[in-house]
Image (spheres, grey):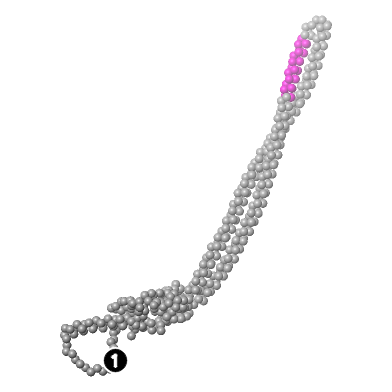
Amino acid sequence: MKRRKVIIALAGLVLVAGIAVVFAGNRSRRGNKQENRPSVQTATLNKRTVMNTLSVTGTVESAMSKTITSSLKDVKVQKVNVQVGDEVKAGDVICVFDTSDLEENLTDAQTNLNVSRQKTANEIETAKEELENTKTATAASAARAGETAAEADSAYQEALEKSDKAYKEYEDASQEEAELKEKTSTIKKEIKEAKSGLSALESMLLAVQTEEEKTQAQADIEKKNAEIESLNKQYEASKKSYEEAGRKTEEKLAEYEAAKKEADNAKSSYKKAVWEKEDTERNNAQSVSGKENSLENSRLNAVNSSSNEENQVEELKEQIESCTIKATSDGIITSLNVEEGEVFSGGQVVTVQDNEALSCQSTWMNMILPTWQKECVWL
């Protein structure tokens, strides 16, 4: 039935061509009869078979022809289900290629995909743990840095207070020394004045003539000597206090200088602790950010890696699926380029022509049959 449709289709072409030739011949003969008008001959009719034969070189083609190709190469043809001239329906299996190698590759690809997924999952988990550990460590280091800075600040404030106190004591000692110095100078001046007065009295004693005046002068001289002696004692005591105050001032100055140096050192330590705290916080932020980036990169790598492996698996599945060649439409097999057992090198597999839209072609005629004539006729 399948080949009969092709034969009938071609027969239609020949029949139409034959009718055209006969019609042309009859018109020619009628013209010749009118011109020549030969004499009529009679003959006895006998029953016999009359046949006109017309040979025409041509082909029958479908108006819709589909060629099925495959990009597979170097694969063995496992099975061929059709031959040239067979009629097929859309979805019929034309042939099947060997999928053993592809299936092995698919198994390997699926294994690689599972391994890749597990590996990336482990990497993500490790990145998460590292991030949490970094957060814990940085929090601890930040706390230590903060405590160190606070302790340095406390030490600086204590040293500063000590320095201020030492400076106050130095000022007090210096003030006392200045006062004793002034007092000692005043007593020394008074001694000098007293001695001058004594000299005057002694001179007066030599000048007086009466005994009464002499007695009075002697009394004044003794009194002045007693005054000078008292002033000398005051001077020595004041001088001693002044000298002690001087030593005390020097001591307080040394204490102040030491306290000030200690305060300066404490201030430097405090500044250093603050800088270290800021550096720690900055480094901690960078460390945490780095671990967060590592985690994000691990997640992106997981997506990319899985995507690549999944694509490979899908490609292999598609290749395995493409090893089964199916007809994409109804029609007749007019060309078949595969044989069972051979190695397919790629390209065209089969050509299917739609037998519902055939056209007849010859070397001298090219026409499409009317819509009411669905088949060509082959005699």
State which quarter of the image contains the C terminus. Answer: bottom left
What residue is shown with label 1? 49
Front-lying residue, 230 or 271: 271
Q: Position of residue 297 (x, y in %)?
A: 56, 58
From the viewer's side, name the closer residue of 229 and 51.
51
Q: Please identify the quarter of the rendering in which residue 231 is found.
A: top right
**How many numbered marks are there?**
1
| Residue 66 within the segment the image draws in magenta | no
Quarter occupied by residue 352:
bottom left
Please state which of residues 280 and 225 is positioned toward the viewer in this rendering.
280
**Closer to us: 221 or 265:** 265
Please report the residue visible at 46 percent of the width from the left and 78 percent of the height from the top.
Answer: 92
Residue bounds of the magenta highlight: 180-203
In the rendered view, tell whether residue 50 sits above or below residue 241: below
Q: Residue 61: percent from the left, percent from the top?
A: 36, 77
Residue at horizontal 62 percent and vertical 59 percent from the top: 128
Tell me which residue sits at (65%, 49%) in the image.
142
Q: Quadrant of the N terminus?
A: bottom left
Q: Is residue 256 visible?
A: no
Residue at figure coordinates x 16%, y 83% from the top left = 35
